[in-house]
Image (cartoon, grey):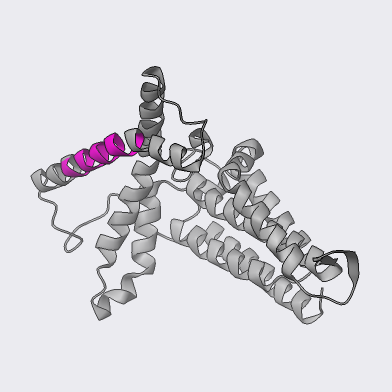
Amino acid sequence: MLKDITLGQYFPGDTALHRLDPRTKTILVIVYIVALFLAVSYVSYAVLLAALAAAIAVSKVRPKVLLKSLKPILILMVLTAVLNLFYTRGTDVLVSFWIITITREGLENAVFMLLRIAMLILGTFLLTYTTSPISLTDGLERLLRPLKKIRVPVHELSMMMCIALRFIPTLLEETDKIISAQKARGADFETGNLIRRAKALIPILVPLFISSFRRADELATAMECRCYHGGEGRTKMKELRYARADAIAFALGGALLAVTIVLRTMGL
């Protein structure tokens, strides 16, 4: 299961999506999420799914890798769909048995919610797959720069996000090593009731927390040795500049949002 968590991983490439400015990709993901919440019919979701498929094709990220990222939240997705299926009231009853009532509106809501969560996760993960953590941090810092006027520590927040994304794969790998080591010592994590399984996690969590604190202390020491003092007066090795491809991407994103709004007003 841990190997299926790919959040924070970056797949290097030289595609049109990789070359886009990180600010452009971040804004487009936000636009895509807004469009997802505005979609109300199969036609709208079909258009958004086609746009996502086109972005995946351009990025050359294997669909198998993206679909694999859904496995850790599959239970949550199914649970959300089931709740919408049974707790949405409607007039067109499809199944009625004892206290269970399934309506056409409930079935549609369940399908839409399942699609919305899956497409939202895939779109967000596509951003991290095609953008390095450093570029993503620089883009976020530039987007949030106006907040400096109200004394928001933009650089520090961006740095924290960069470090968090950078160490997610490392901590997952460390967790996998700890689990393998504990299994070699005879630990059992797969049998017993819920309480017993929870207690079995203690030999994993304790060394993982110790390792995390040690890595954090080493990172803090390294930053202090390099005289790190925040974002004031710092320069960038690569300055972010918008290009023609970014303008085209913004136009496509705006068109997608406009189409979704029009379809919503038409009830499609």
In the rendered image, the quadrant that contains the C terminus is bottom right
The residue depicted at 81 percent of the width and 80 percent of the height is: 266
Res 257 quadrant in image: bottom right
Instruction: Give left or right: position of 80 versus 192.
Output: right
Residue 102 horizontal/vertical position (percent):
83, 65
Res 152 quadrant in image: bottom left
Instruction: Give left or right: position of 167 versus 131.
Output: left
Residue 188 horizontal/vertical position (percent):
45, 26
The residue depicted at 25 percent of the width and 36 percent of the height is: 211
Q: Is residue 214 magenta?
A: yes
- From the viewer's side, name the closer residue of 162 and 81: 81
- From the viewer's side, name the closer residue of 26 and 99: 99
Residue 16 horizontal/vertical position (percent):
57, 48
Q: Is residue 118 visible?
A: no
- From the viewer's side, name the closer residue of 7 and 92: 92
Q: Is residue 178 magenta?
A: no
The residue depicted at 80 percent of the width and 66 percent of the height is: 99
Res 208 quadrant in image: top left
Q: Is residue 64 visible?
A: yes
Query: Where are the magenta residues, as a range?
Result: 204-217
- From the viewer's side, name the closer residue of 75 and 27: 75
Is the residue 27 above or below the residue 219 in the image?
Answer: below
Residue 254 horizontal/vertical position (percent):
63, 70
Instruction: Give left or right: position of 240 versus 93.
Output: left
Principal SS element in the magenta part? helix
The residue depicted at 73 percent of the width and 69 percent of the height is: 87
